Image (tube, rainbow, N blue to C red):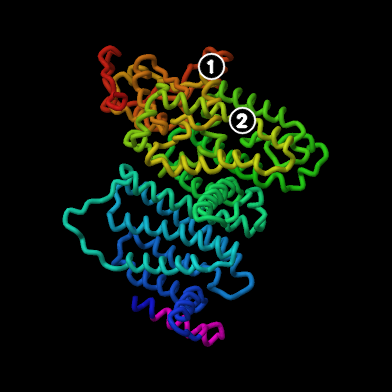
Amino acid sequence: MVALAADLVVGWMIGRLSGTGATPLGVAGALTVAAQTLTSPGFLILASTEMALLTLLLWRTISPAFRIPLLFQAAILFLTPMTIPAAGWAPSALYGLSFGLVALFVYILLFAYRNRQIDLPVSRYLLSLVGTGAIVAAGLFLWSAYGSPVLLTVSVVLELGVFGLAVLPRPVRAGEVGLLWQFNAFWTFRLLLSIVAAEIFLGATLDAQTWGASFLGVVPFLPLAGSPLTVVANALYNALWFLAAVSISAWFLILLGIGMGALVLPKFRDLKHREQKARLALMMGAYAVAGVYIPSMWTSTPLLHNAALASLPVLGWGMGLRTGGPFMTSFFAGILLMYVAVGSLSVLFGRRAICSVMCGAAMMFQGTTISAMTTFNRTSRIGRMFLGSRFSTAFTVTSSLALVSLVGISLLPYLHLLNGASSTILLPFLFYFGTLWIVMFVSIPYVGNYNCATTGFCHWGSLSMLFSWVGFFRVKAKDRTVCQACTTYDCAKACPVALVDMPLQLQATGEFRSGKCVGAGECIEACPYDNLYIHDVRHWLRRTLWPDRPPHPPLPKVRPSTAPTPVRAAETSSPPLAS
């Protein structure tokens, strides 16, 4: 507190010398001056420099877990738009601060992945840090869009407070144990919620910087007037559609892709199979093209002014939905083509072509830290309702509703044509593809990982599931006796959609088929004997065109000391995970 007060005084004096300060008159005046000082160039430069120097001076005495985040804090404070009173500083600082916060979140998520048990002081600090980051992001949006510095000022105070608590020595409490975050739903939920909330506001800030306030023009915000109950209801309505609109905007998708993609990249180093590496590369490319570029940027490029392209519908998860223009003229062909494409790919390559390559959810769920949250499929009450390949009542109801909604969303372009430029038609689309996806992601600790697939919530996944039943895709064992003798069940433990009955099918038939399987290939990588592989149309073609070639990849190379002893299928007991 003494250091903060000294910095405030120095910052105020610098402001007075530069002619920007003010003389306090009474309590209200003093609070006004304090708020102005907290966001003044003198204070921000002084405070951020002190934070960086103090971290370097205490480098050997503070915990390694605090070092890099503390430096991030100093950089984030320095990148506040008011730090340097130059014409080009504020816009550049907004972009720098946004990417800096995303980099900090990536560091924290990777730290959690490498440390499954985190010391309690570190866990509290990391949670406070991401929470403060969310407030910083909200403050940036309010300042850049509406000129209000209040929340940004509050975030500066919180940043200084979190930094001070991190560098202060903490007494070790007797009996204090670390946090097993993979089994602590509340801690993990708050971490995900804070990160997503921060990226929502950062995306809105950069969208407003790039395209102006018109990027929210599609949402008919309600006035905050009337009775208190009306004001609250209208505020909730506005917040809901703000979230929906921003969550499908270009900059949010870019920031989300950078953050989630940074969690996918470490997998390339650890993967054993080239096929898996190729799939991840295709997944990242599909997210960049189909998830960001086509829906958010393609419609504003000069390419679309070409007369030869004027009659083509806009294809993608939006079902050809656009606000008007030549792209609406053949939307039925676009919808039909999308159904045919999804069905054909699902028959040939299984659900993995949609759920593990083309869909943006694959990028969100398959990074290292998020993959590690598979434990919540078995520990959460809702997650346990969807375990295994069996279609529970809850799954049947959810997937049926999703398929019905697919038809409804497909009709939105036609209804939009009938209603002219009415933006109300877009709201169900924004809600479905925006808000609900974010809710599903942050609810992983309470619903389970990859819950768009496990619960049947995704209508495209439900459609792909139907086609995959008649297709070529399945997980096969090179040697069934190896599976029969296996006692690790690592394949089921690694499955991101908790298909815990996988070992039973592999032991009984030597292959595994399930409409719920998204083909992520985690089971292939997790098998300690390299005994599993993915079978699809490629293997069928090879068997048909070149019958003399082996029907599967080489048999597993297992050293005699580690090879499981084959047993008869009848003697194999059920794995604990499937019970």
State the SS at label 1: loop
- The tag on residue 408 is 2
Q: Earlier in the sequence, mark 2 or mark 1?
A: 2
Would residue 83 be visible to someone looking at this image? yes
Residue 410 in percent (x, y) is at 64, 31
State the SS at label 2: helix
Measure how far apart labels 2 and 1 are at the Cα level.
25 Å
Q: Farthest front residue? A: 227
Would residue 491 be visible to someone looking at this image? no
Looking at the rendered image, the quarter that the C terminus falls into is top left
Residue 161 placement, left or right of 252? left
Residue 478 in the magenta stretch? The answer is: no
Residue 398 in percent (x, y) is at 47, 28
Looking at the rendered image, the quarter that the N terminus falls into is bottom left
Magenta stretch? 6-22
What residue is shown at x 26% (from left), y 18% (from top)?
A: 573
Residue 547 in percent (x, y) is at 54, 12
What residue is shown at x 36% (from left), y 77% (from top)?
A: 3
Residue 408 drawn above or below residue 8: above
Chief SS of the magenta region:
helix
Residue 106 in percent (x, y) is at 45, 52
Q: Front-most of 30 and 43?
A: 30
Q: Amino acid at mark 1?
A: Val
Q: Amino acid at mark 2?
A: Gly
What residue is shown at x 61% (from left), y 35% (from top)?
A: 317
Q: Farthest right residue? A: 307
Q: Quadrant of residue 122?
A: bottom left
Q: Quadrant of residue 357?
A: top right
Residue 539 drawn above or below residue 147: above
Give the residue number, with chain letter if any, for mark 1. 470
Q: Front-most of 206 and 63?
A: 206
What residue is shown at x 47% (from left), y 23% (from top)?
A: 515
